[in-house]
């Protein structure tokens, strides 16, 4: 019995059958030669399944498939490593590091989030089905007019944008993108079955005729300059490990704080994106589906479809790989696999434990506060910070990080980056909380606190 089979026993039989049924339907209805999937929970693979048109054989966790634009997430990891080391800033214009590209003032962050205004594709012929040798220089990838939108104004998916990011990695590292990726990401994470060129065993890519059950082999081109946008081949086993990294971080590659940054929306949303519950972070797609927030990425190249979907809250991830040009909607399959496990076997929370200690000065602030007549609760959080949220359940809320000097900085929403501090009277008692000029008091419009605009001396009254 393989390790994957041993781990699979962690799921209930009904859950395993539901997962198998979902990929069986996807392979059959999607008319794909093969489909392979894995589910990760609590940091390890707990299920692996495959369906194939070849009798007596099914791809396992070590069979490579081409993963297309999932490559972009790997490239984003390399760029954020450079940022964390201080080699660049996300607000840097790309021209600072790659002068003469014609990409205007698009920043590194805007290219990561596909909001740099660049075209979606390189000039003809279609780059995914032709040799990369046809586009040896960045100018060949970008064309005469690289920009099709104002920089930073809208999310517009761009393969040339990630080609630029790959070139940026090469310029600052002084080595080929593939070499840097292997040394800085693949080897530390143990992704030894992820590579720029296919390694046996690997699946062949096929086009399935839309109106007949016949197939045509697809070419597997080396993308050359555009490798950073879609070159990689990988396996369910490796992508399962990559999913764990994108959930928890790994200090050998990126910290947990930086992978959280990757998962946060970073691009302006189109109206259609808002309606679909979709956004884009720094190299990661974000989707609100079935009541849960999902992050990951999809990929496609002629002959292949791929998807990685993660629910951080549920600590469940799914990988789906298939070898056809069009067919199964892998993003839907991935989301369904996550949902099946999360709903059938919901995550069991860690036992509550009391804090080792509590700062008396901070504990004094816990409880109910009022901004005008709006009631809020301030709570101490296990990480040493505080949270502030409306008692109604609706409105502005945020967690705050302790700064070590008796103040806190907002981490999310309206109060992100804003400073929270407790103002004290000369005798040391707390007068009020100040949050970006908002005054929070222990009672609504407390006359003993410096409420902006003052408090009517006649106090509260009825109509009478």
Image: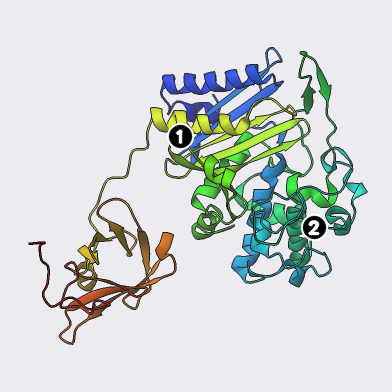
Q: Residue furthest front?
A: 464
Residue 448: percent from left, percent from top: 15, 78
Q: Is residue 186 in sight in this rendering?
A: no
Q: Residue 247, labelled with which disc?
A: none
Q: Quadrant of residue 69?
A: top right
Q: Is residue 64 above or below residue 403?
A: above
**Label 2 packing within 10 angstroms: few (<14), some (14-19), many (20+):** few
Q: Is residue 324 in sight in this rendering?
A: yes
Left/right of residue 456 with respect to residue 280 in the rendered view: left
Secondary structure state at the residue bearing disc 1: loop
Residue 151: percent from left, percent from top: 70, 62
Q: Is residue 444 above or below residue 137?
A: below
Q: Nearer the viewer, mark 1 or mark 2?
A: 1
**Label 1 packing within 10 angstroms: few (<14), some (14-19), many (20+):** few
| Marks 1 and 2, how far apart at CA | 41 Å
Residue 161: percent from left, percent from top: 74, 55
Q: Residue furthest left?
A: 464
Number of marks drawn = 2
Question: Which residue is painted at 66% across and 32% down in the image?
Answer: 62
Q: Which residue is mark 2?
A: 176
Q: Which residue is mark 1?
A: 290
Q: Is residue 150 above or below residue 198?
A: below
Question: Considering the image in quadrants, where does the C terminus appear?
Answer: bottom left
Question: Which residue is painted at 85% across and 37% down in the image?
Answer: 129
Q: Nearer the viewer, residue 197 or 275?
A: 275
Secondary structure state at the residue bearing disc 2: loop
| Colour scheme of the rendered structure | rainbow
Question: Considering the image in quadrants, where does the N terminus appear?
Answer: top right
Q: Residue furthest bottom?
A: 426
N-term mark: 1 or 2: 2
Q: Quadrant of residue 76?
A: bottom right
Residue 369: percent from left, percent from top: 22, 65
């Amino acid at each position: 019995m393989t390790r994957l089979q041993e781990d699979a026993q962690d799921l209930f039989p009904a859950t395993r059958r539901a997962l198998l049924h979902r990929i069986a339907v996807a392979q059959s209805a999607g008319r794909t030669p093969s489909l392979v999937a894995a589910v990760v929970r609590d940091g390890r693979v707990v299920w692996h399944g495959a369906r194939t048109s070849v009798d007596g054989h099914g791809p396992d966790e070590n069979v490579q498939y081409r993963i297309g634009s999932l490559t972009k997430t790997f490239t984003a990891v390399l760029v954020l490593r450079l940022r964390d080391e201080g080699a660049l800033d996300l607000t840097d214009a790309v021209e600072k590091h790659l002068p003469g590209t014609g990409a205007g003032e698009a920043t590194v962050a805007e290219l990561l989030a596909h909001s740099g205004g660049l075209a979606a594709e390189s000039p003809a012929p279609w780059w995914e089905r032709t040799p990369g040798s046809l586009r040896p220089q960045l100018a060949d990838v970008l064309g005469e007019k690289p920009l099709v939108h104002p920089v930073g104004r809208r999310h517009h998916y761009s393969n040339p944008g990630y080609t630029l990011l790959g070139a940026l990695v090469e310029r600052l590292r002084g080595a080929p993108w593939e070499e840097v990726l292997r040394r800085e990401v693949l080897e530390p994470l143990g992704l030894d079955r992820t590579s720029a060129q296919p390694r046996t065993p690997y699946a062949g890519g096929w086009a399935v005729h839309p109106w007949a059950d016949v197939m045509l082999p697809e070419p597997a081109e080396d993308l050359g300059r555009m490798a950073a946008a879609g070159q990689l081949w990988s396996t369910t086993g490796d992508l399962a490990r990559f999913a764990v990294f994108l959930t928890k971080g790994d200090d050998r590659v990126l910290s947990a704080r930086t992978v959280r940054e990757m998962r946060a929306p970073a691009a302006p949303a189109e109206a259609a994106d808002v309606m679909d519950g979709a956004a884009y972070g720094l190299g990661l797609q974000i989707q609100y589906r079935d009541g849960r927030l999902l992050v990951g990425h999809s990929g496609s190249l002629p002959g292949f479809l791929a998807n990685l979907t993660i629910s951080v809250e549920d600590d469940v991830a799914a990988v789906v790989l298939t070898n056809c040009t069009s067919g199964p909607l892998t993003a839907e399959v991935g989301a369904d696999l996550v949902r099946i496990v999360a709903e059938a076997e919901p995550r069991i929370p860690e036992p509550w434990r009391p804090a080792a200690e509590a700062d008396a000065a901070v504990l004094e602030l816990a409880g109910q506060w009022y901004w005008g007549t709006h009631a809020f609760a301030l709570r101490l959080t296990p990480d040493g910070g505080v949270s502030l949220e409306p008692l109604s359940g609706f409105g502005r809320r945020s967690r705050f990080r302790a700064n070590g000097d008796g103040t806190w900085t907002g981490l999310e929403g309206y109060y992100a980056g804003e400073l929270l501090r407790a103002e004290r009277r000369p005798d040391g008692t707390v007068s009020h909380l100040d949050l970006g000029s908002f005054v929070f008091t222990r009672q609504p419009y407390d006359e003993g606190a410096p409420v902006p605009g003052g408090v009517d001396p006649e106090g509260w009254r009825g109509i009478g």
